Amino acid sequence: MPDAAASAPRERIYALLIVCVLAVASMLVIALADVAPARATATDMLGQARDPGERAFIAAHRGGGATAPENTLPAIREALRGGFEYVEVDLALSADGHAVLMHDKTVDRTTDGHGRVVDLTLAQLRALDAGRTFAPAYRGTPVPTAEEVLDLLVTEGGRALLDLKGRWDAGAVATLAAQIEVRGLSNRVVAAGFDARTLAALVAQAPELSRMATLKVIPDDIVEAAQQFGVSGVIVDRRALAKRPEVVDELHAAGLRIVVYTLNSDRQWGEVTDLGVDGIVTDDPVMLDDWQRTALGR
C-alpha cells in the first residue's frame, strides 16, 4: 500500500489533470451546443436529487457479480429482470478495437485465459471461458461484446451505466455511440469513465449521450468543472466522499447528481443514504434492495 504522504501529491496531480481536460472539453460543449441533439437531463436519467435519508437508485456493479459471473450476460440479464434501475458494466477495447466487457487490464482473474485485454483480439477474447472460475454451472460463458449488452437492454428493458476502461479514442467512442443510437437507447444509457481524454472524446463524438465523470479524487472545484464539461453528475469512490461529504449538497445545488461506488454493507449504505446520494453501486443489488425496504420503508 502506498505511503499516504507520498500519495497526496499524486492525488492532487490527478485532480488537476481532470480539471484541465474538463476545461478544454468545455470549449467543445459550447461549440457543439447549437448543433448537437438534445441530451436527456440529469433528472430524466438519474431522477430528482435525493434528500438525506431518501432512497438512492441501485446500480448492479459489473452486472451484479454476487449471483453470476461479473460482466457476463447471465449476470446482466438477472439484474435487469430483478428490476434494479441500472446495470453497471465495464467496457474495454481489444487489440483490434472491439469493445468487450472486462474490468481488469488482464483476463487472468475472471477467465481461463492469460494476458492483457489490449493485447488480445476479439476472436481470442471470445474463445475464453468467463464462467468456469465463478461456478461450474456457468462453464462456457463467453466474454460479451458491447453490442450484445445493448441488445439485451433492448429485449429486457432497463438502463445501463457504461464504464469505459482505459483510453478510448474518437473512433472507438463514435462506434459505441452509433451502436447505442441505432438501437434507440440514447435515453437509457449513461457513459462514464476515469480517463479525462475519454470523457473529452465523448463530448466531441457523442454529445447526445448522457455522461458522468468517474472520480477517485474529488477536485476542489468539481461543480465548476462538471458544469463546463456538461456531465449529468459524478460517480465517486466512497472513500473520497467520506473526505468531502459536503460535496453532495454542492452538486445538488448545481442541478447535478452523485453516485457512489462500490458499497456492500449495511453500514456503508446507511452512511451515504444519510448524505442524500442519488445512486449506489453495489455487488449485491438484492441485499441492498432488501436493506432499503427494511431501513427506509420502501
Image: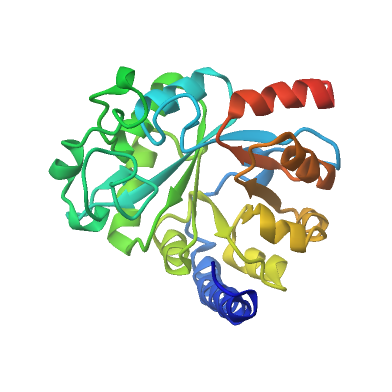
Residue 298 visible in rendering: no
Q: In this view, does 115 lie above or below 23?
A: above
Residue 186 in percent (x, y) is at 47, 40
Q: Is residue 223 above or below residue 295?
A: below
Drawn side of residue 274 relative to residue 114, left or right: right
Residue located 13% across and 42% down the image: 123
Residue 277 in percent (x, y) is at 75, 45
Residue located 65% across and 25% down the image: 287
Location of the N terminus by quadrant is bottom right
Q: In which quarter of the image is residue 178?
A: top left
Location of the C terminus by quadrant is top right
Q: In this view, does 5 lie above or below 102?
A: below
Residue 181 in percent (x, y) is at 38, 40
Q: What is the total number of numbered labels drawn onto the structure image?
A: 0
Residue located 74% across and 34% down the image: 266
Q: Which colour scheme is used?
A: rainbow
Residue located 35% across and 55% down the image: 173
Q: Quadrant of residue 278?
A: top right
Q: In this view, does 122 lie above or below 170?
A: above
Drawn side of residue 130 relative to residue 64, left or right: left
Residue 113 in percent (x, y) is at 21, 43
